[in-house]
Image (cartoon, helix red, strand yellow):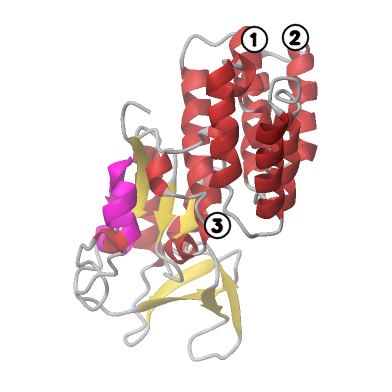
Amino acid sequence: MKDKIKIGVSSCLLGEKVRWNGDHKQNHYVREVLAKYFEYIPICPEVEAGMGVPREAVALYGTLESQQMISRKTQTDWTKPMRQYIKVCMDNLANHNLCGYIFKSKSPSCGLGRVPVYSEFGSNNIRHGPGMFADAFTRKFPLVPTVDEDKLNDPKRRETFIVKVFSYCRLKNLFSTRFSIGKLVEFHTHHKFLLLAHSRKYYDALGQLVAQPKSLKQIELKAQYGSLFMKALSFKSTSKKNTDVLLHMMGFLKNILTKPEKKDILAAIDDYRKELLPLIVPITLIKQQVKKHKIDYLSNQVYLNPHPKELLLRNHV
């Protein structure tokens, strides 16, 4: 990507002192690492809805389907101001072309899940769901990759989110430029192994869609392909899926490599499968051979370079 990818983020994660107690929840990975690749649109719904800093802590009450946001001490009802702000903000965000959003976990406004929703004030009857703002965002922009910041501590969840962000950006670029069936086929071909590393089921479904594109209007084709594409990437890649992909790639090299070269790569793949080596090792060995022998089909595969190598997302066992 030549330009930084634009994504939304809870303001407190960038170190902005917008929390109810006047503090922040700065996240080093978000602020220092991902900021090299992402352009942030920082938002604090509670401040922008008029609550101020510092402020009374709020909580959610009612049902998961009909939430109310009420302050814990004075029982001030912030539901209407929050809903009014959300409506205006969602319309504004539609113009920002976001390719992702990092939310503050467990926040009554920004948490994606596990946010307590009390049946009534003073009750111990609790259910858990999304915060009001996060819920509205995911409904308005269902394809945009989202994550709670605490999930970024898990290497697998972190990689899944970042792969989705970069992939969604490529998808939007495909749809925003002069679109053609040929470009869609090329896009799908280049993402073959990345899709297989996440979901063969959805890769097959996408293949069927690409094989008979003329049965749909262009707007319907884009909508269906985009939905299935992002759904496929929501599944975690696993060592088994990656091993299958690596062995599939080896099929393009089997008549080219010397026996020692083939033995070394297969040994690295097997050690990765046994969780003795990180994924980057067999991938690097394969990339070296792809470059050496100029195998265009593999060199164009996004799977080999789905995100900046500096993020070290494939360096864990």
Residue 191 lies in quadrant: top right
Boundaries of the magenta span = 29-48
- Left or right? Give the position of 150 relative to 265: left
Q: Residues within 10 Å of mark 1 (few under 14, many from 20)?
A: some
Question: SS of the residue at dot 1?
Answer: helix
> In the image, which is nearer the foreground, mark 2 or mark 1?
1
**Which residue is label 1 attached to?**
181
Q: For this view, does 299 lie left or right of residue 43?
A: right
Q: Which type of secondary structure does the marked residue at label 2 adopt?
A: helix
**Mark 3 highlights which residue?**
157
Q: Are marks 3 and 2 in contact (CB under 8 Å)?
A: no
- For marks 3 and 2, the one nearer the N-term is 3
Instruction: Specify which label sits upstream in the sequence, 1 or 3.
Output: 3
Along the line of sight, the residue nearer the viewer: 46 or 166:
166
Q: Nearer the viewer, mark 3 or mark 2?
A: 3
Which of the two marks, 1 or 3, is nearer to us in this view?
3
Which residue type carries mark 2? Lys
Residue drawn at point x = 33 percent, y = 56 percent: 30
Quarter of the figure with residue 104: bottom left
Residue at 51% across / 76% down in the picture? 61
Q: Is residue 43 visible?
A: no
Q: Residue sitting at 43 percent across and 70 percent down?
A: 108
The residues bearing labels 2 and 1 have C-alpha atoms spaced at a distance of 9 Å
Q: Earlier in the sequence, mark 2 or mark 1?
A: 1
> Considering the numbered disc 3 on the image, is that residue within a helix, a strand or a loop?
helix
Tell me the residue at 66%/41% (across/down). 264
**Is residue 142 shown in magenta?**
no
Q: CA distance from mark 3 to mark 2?
A: 36 Å
Q: Which label sits on residue 214?
A: 2
Marks 2 and 1 close (CB-CB < 8 Å): yes
Residue placed most toward the observer, 151 or 59: 151
